[in-house]
Image (cartoon, rainbow, N blue to C red):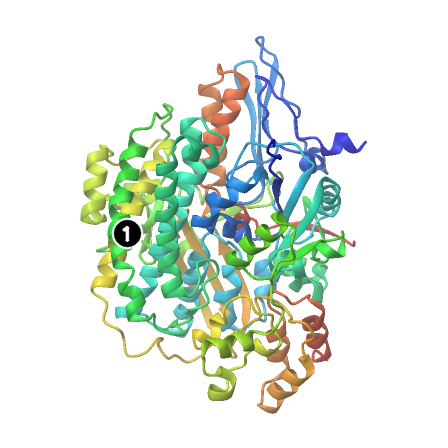
Amino acid sequence: MPRQRKPKLAVWKFASCDGCQLSLLDCEEELLAVVGEVEIAYFLEASRAVIKGPYDISLVEGSITTPHDEERIHQVRRMSKTVVTIGACATAGGIQALRNFTNVRDYIPLVYATPAFIHTLNKSTPIADHIFVDLELRGCPINKHQLVELLSAILNGRKPNLPQHSVCIECKQRGNVCVMVSQGLPCLGPVTQTGCDALCPEFLRGCFGCFGPKEMPNMASLASHWLKEGMAKPELVRRFRGFNAYAEPFRKESEAHEK
Amino acid sequence: MRSKKVAPRGRRAGGRVTHPTAPRLRRNQPQKKIVTPLPTVERVATGQIRNISVGALARVEGEGGIAIRLKGDVVQDVKVRIYEPPRFFEAFLRKRSYHEVPDITARICGICPVAYQTSSCQAIEHIFDVTVDGALRDLRRLLYCGEWIESHVLHIAMLHLPDFLGYEDAIQLSRAQPELVKAALRLKKIGNDVMVVVGGREIHPVNVRVGGFYRLPRLEQLRALVEPLRWALGTARELVRITAGLTFPDFTQDYEFVALRHPDEYPVHEGRIVSSKGVDIAVKDYESVFAEEHVEHSNALHSVRKGGGSYLVGPLARYNLNFDRLTPQAREAAEAAGLRPPVTNQFQSIIVRAIETVFAVEESLRIIEHYEPPAAASVPFQVREGIGMGCTEAPRGILYHRYKVDGHGLIQQAKIVPPTSQNLRTMESDLRAFATKHRHLPTDRLTWQCEQAVRNYDPCISCATHFLKLEVESP
């Protein structure tokens, strides 16, 4: 039987730090295996060779922050069978979405002295605000093992196994002592989706929410606990405003305490 | 006309498919004052216009392009265009707490987060009058060496080497020389492993804080790095040998090299700022000597020396100014490669990166072998208001940070000058000189070599795009 053609993989970058694309190059041992299974058709960070679309799998990194990117993402969608957003920028708007809580116009006199040569939108928005997204991979940065799992799931036509429970569950599995209970450190673990192996508690610090909100997080409960422990409101707002600040549960909770 | 938008940016002279691509097309349309000459014209009778244009540079970090316009034998215009979207770090760092800064600035760059974390920590420690020394200082240096290994090997093997051997990418290279690519990937992974053990993870480490670390690395994990690092030392030396054997375009320039210099070590995270043309200042005086200028075709500012011109930071600058500080094996590898300073051909930066990889591996080994765990993971300090500066040697060159903090530890002002924006002006002058010198090459070949001339800088365009003048549109 003749061999079927390999699925074509494209990697697109919008506003981001490149870290999630780098995770793909960081799959050292797995990288060559993945490369064997797909045709890398468009991956500018790695190659100047470009193969025409349409593409079977498009990995999208970064958030939408310019009028041009707002249009470009639709072109990516049209050319792609499966669109996967990778990382906090693409799934939630990223750290640059902090501008969404203020008026970017207010930033200008603060930081920039003279008029502009380029355009920017006043919000940084996740990819799913613009197009239909088939699958998403959370994290700032993404977990490379989850990336390999996701790619192999797509290649084999199955659902990827990506847990949506909280960091706390993983933290208990690792046998960590709870940093919030034992040391009183503020920790976003109870409301944050797992994927990092409960890394921060392992390093004796509270979770700061790299993987965004877990499924059905109880934000109000965590906030009231922190307030009871004496955290000031401005700090509470900052805690919810990290790399996933614009993800709905985090955004709403931070806005509720802003007044 | 969907197909028109979607088709890759087509065939160029020579019939080779070069650069992309559809989704970028609109970038190339005139926007405000940015006039981009397109498309490429086949060469060339005397006096005819010829454009070398790369819409989107490949194998660099971030989004940028180049546009060169030749009229006959004269290069009329050179632009390195940076269109990476601005992310406004300096703006939203305001009113954040000092302890959040290393976590936030790490997100400027996924390839060199430790550089951002270390420069920010040092700037803030400068304000709080904290000295991180002894074993904690060593651990910081070790983490940074891990990043040098990871970043340098990524650039050498995956991004830069394919140019010299005529491949489009490391995937093609891996078909021709699988052992080489596998060894390089393993070497890069060892750099990542160092970052994981000390920093918690390789991209955006979580263990870095003002005053030191959240937790000390586990001793057994540190020791487990020794054996892979010994292997890495041999492999890095092999990389020096391989890169030194490449053929380099004849292209030397009179650069002003700027790097850190430390009394007794090769500069990574400490030192005075010195230059090959007489600068010798403390980090806090950086802004009295260097300044940024805004140009309209770039979303990143260009740095210049006040009253002077462009300058060069990065591997060549460090090497030329600190050759006498190299570790023994790195020195030996350099001698064997016959690469004596001053090195003035940026194409040879690939050899220097390999030599610096040997250094970083050797230094990592030294630190681990002499490591005695300190009493605490961080140095205590009192928050106070003030202004502080920090500067470290990111893999791509010096990275300067300045913060103003109030009495509650909240950031009032932030300034970040990444290495790539310091190099932008020099990158353009390189392109001008290179295109002038090699103008007789066929367009496709000249285009590729011009791209390569930019890749010599290992440009990190995401990093460079913070200082931005902008116009805001509502969605």
Q: In the displayed structure, would residue B63 be above or below residue B203?
A: above
- Say which element carries label 1: helix
The image position of residue A152, as x and y in percent, is 57, 51
Q: Give the position of the N terminus of chain B as an image quadrant.
A: top right
Spot the residue most to the front: A1
The image position of residue B296, as x and y in percent, is 62, 40
Q: In the displayed structure, would residue B12 be above or below residue A64?
A: above
Q: Nearer the viewer, residue A33 or B431?
A: A33
The image position of residue B67, as x and y in percent, is 58, 29
Residue at numbered disc 1: B361
Q: Which residue does the image show at 57% across and 49% down from the upper left? A: B465
Can residue B81 be seen from the camera position used here? no
The amino acid pointed to by label 1 is Val
Q: Give the position of the C terminus of chain B as an image quadrant.
A: bottom right
The image position of residue B239, as x and y in percent, is 30, 39
Q: Residues within 10 Å of mark 1 (few under 14, many from 20)?
A: many
Can residue A136 be seen from the camera position used here? yes
Spot the residue most to the top: B45
| Horizontal side of residue B173 vs B1, given as left or right | left
Q: In the displayed structure, would residue A89 be above or below residue A79?
A: below
Q: Quadrant of residue A252?
A: bottom right
Q: Which residue does the image show at 57% across and 8% down from the upper left? A: B46
Q: Which residue does the image show at 36% across and 23% down from the upper left? A: B250
Q: Nearer the viewer, residue A29 or B197?
A: A29
| Subunit under mark 1 | B
